[in-house]
Image (cartoon, rainbow, N blue to C red):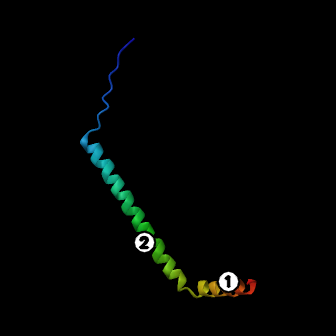
């Protein structure tokens, strides 16, 4: 039977790439959140959405 040795060390460049990837992922998440919020605010000003919300509130008032 042969004995095989495996080097389990993580070199610094791999570690740095991993940290950079995590940083980029969190930045992308933040950008996505901002885009969603911005689009939501744009939608709220849309005449169609305003009409639908108004109609929904009207129906909600009738149920009470």
Picture quarter with the N terminus: top left
- Residue at 61%, 85% (x, y): give it: 48
**In terms of depth relative to the viewer, which is nearer, 63 or 35?**
63
Above or below, comparing residue 17 to residue 41 in the picture:
above
- State which quadrant residue 6 falls in: top left
**In terms of depth relative to the viewer, which is nearer, 45 or 60?**
60
Picture quarter with the C terminus: bottom right
Measuring from the top left, give residue 7's x and y in whole percent: 30, 29
Above or below, comparing residue 19 to residue 64 in the picture:
above
- Residue at 50%, 82% (x, y): give it: 42
Q: Secondary structure at mark 2?
A: helix
Above or below, comparing residue 3 to residue 22 in the picture:
above
**Image check: 12 left or right of 27?**
left
Q: For mark 2, does the 10 Å Cα neighbourhood hold few (<14), some (14 to 19), or many (20 or more) residues?
A: few
**Residue for badge 1:** 56
Measuring from the top left, give residue 50's x and y in whole percent: 59, 87
**Image check: 54 left or right of 37?**
right
- Of discs 2 and 1, which sits in the foreground? 1
**Image check: 31 left or right of 48?**
left
- State which quadrant residue 44 falls in: bottom right
Measuring from the top left, give residue 49's x and y in whole percent: 60, 83
Above or below, comparing residue 22 to residue 30 in the picture:
above
- Residue at 51%, 77% (x, y): give it: 40
Q: Are marks 2 and 1 in contact (CB under 8 Å)?
A: no
**Residue for badge 2:** 34
């Amino acid at each position: 039977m042969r004995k095989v040795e495996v080097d389990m060390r993580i070199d610094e460049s791999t570690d740095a790439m991993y940290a950079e990837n995590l940083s980029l992922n969190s930045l992308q998440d933040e950008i996505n959140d901002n885009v969603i919020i911005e689009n939501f605010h744009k939608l709220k000003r849309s005449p169609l959405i305003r009409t639908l919300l108004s109609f929904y509130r009207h129906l909600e008032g009738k149920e009470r």
